[in-house]
Image: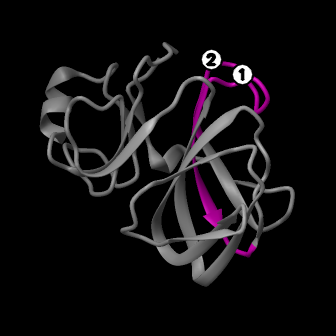
C-alpha cells in the first residue's frame, strides 16, 4: 500500500442518478467493490439535488470541502452542510436526500462497514490520525492529496503536522 494518493490521479465517474460524480480514493480490502468494502474514501462533485444511494450496514461521514452548501434530510430532519461545517456522520441505510443551496460542491466521503466507525475532524493535522486529506499544499504535496499516515515516511508526517486537513481516525484500522 502506498502512503500518498494524489488528487491529480483521481478519476471522476458519473452517479447513476446523474446528480454528480464520484472519485474513489481508496477501498479496503484491496479489490473490494461497493458491496463488500470495509473502508472506502472518496470525493464527490454534487451538481444537483436528489436522493443519496443507500448503503445498508455502512456508516458514513460527509464533509463539504468547497463550493456551495447543501441540506441533507434524514428522517424528516434537515442538516445544513457547507464549506467549514463540521463533518456529518449518518447511517448509510437511512434514506437521505440532498438539496443543493447555491452552486455545485465538492465533498469528502468516508464510509465504513459496521462495526467499524471512523471519527472525522477538520483543522490542523495531528499525527495521531490514520488518513489526512490536505486542505492546503504542504511538504511538496498538493491540496486535496490524501496521505495514509501509517504508511507515509515519518519525516513527511512530521512536516504535515499542523497543516489544515480533514483527518480520519479509525479505532481499529483495517490494514490494506
From the top left corner, tell me how far across and down residue 74 is, in percent.
Answer: 69, 61
Pick the front one: 91 or 11: 91
Pick the front one: 130 or 140: 130
- Residue farthest to the bottom? 102
**Residue beneath the point at 61% across and 38% down:** 59
Pointer 1: what residue? 32
Q: Residues within 10 Å of mark 2 (few under 14, many from 20)?
A: some
Taking the magenta stretch, the answer to whether it contains residue 140 is no
Q: Residues within 10 Å of mark 1 (few under 14, many from 20)?
A: some
Is residue 80 in sight in this rendering? Answer: yes
- Residue farthest to the top? 175
Report helix, strand or loop for mark 1: loop
- Residue farthest to the right? 16
From the top left corner, tell me how far across and down residue 8 is, in percent.
Answer: 48, 50
**138 in relation to 79, above or below:** above
Gap between marks 1 and 2 measured at Cα = 5 Å
The magenta segment: 25-49
Pointer 2: what residue? 29
Amino acid at each position: 500500500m502506498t502512503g500518498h494518493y494524489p488528487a491529480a490521479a483521481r478519476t471522476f465517474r458519473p452517479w447513476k442518478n446523474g446528480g454528480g460524480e464520484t472519485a474513489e480514493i481508496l477501498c479496503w480490502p484491496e479489490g473490494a467493490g461497493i458491496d463488500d468494502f470495509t473502508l472506502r474514501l472518496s470525493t464527490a462533485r454534487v451538481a444537483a439535488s436528489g436522493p443519496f444511494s443507500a448503503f445498508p450496514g455502512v456508516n458514513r461521514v460527509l464533509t463539504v470541502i468547497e463550493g456551495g452548501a447543501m441540506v441533507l434530510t434524514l428522517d424528516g430532519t434537515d442538516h445544513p452542510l457547507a464549506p467549514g461545517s463540521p463533518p456529518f456522520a449518518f447511517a448509510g441505510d437511512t434514506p437521505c436526500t440532498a438539496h443543493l443551496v447555491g452552486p455545485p460542491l465538492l465533498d469528502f466521503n468516508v464510509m465504513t462497514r459496521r462495526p467499524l466507525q471512523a471519527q472525522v475532524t477538520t483543522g490542523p493535522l495531528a499525527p495521531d490520525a490514520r488518513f489526512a486529506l490536505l486542505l492546503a499544499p504542504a511538504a511538496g504535496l498538493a491540496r486535496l492529496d490524501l496521505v495514509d499516515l501509517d504508511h507515509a515516511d515519518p519525516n513527511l508526517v512530521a512536516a504535515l503536522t499542523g497543516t489544515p486537513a480533514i483527518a480520519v481516525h479509525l479505532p481499529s484500522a483495517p490494514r490494506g
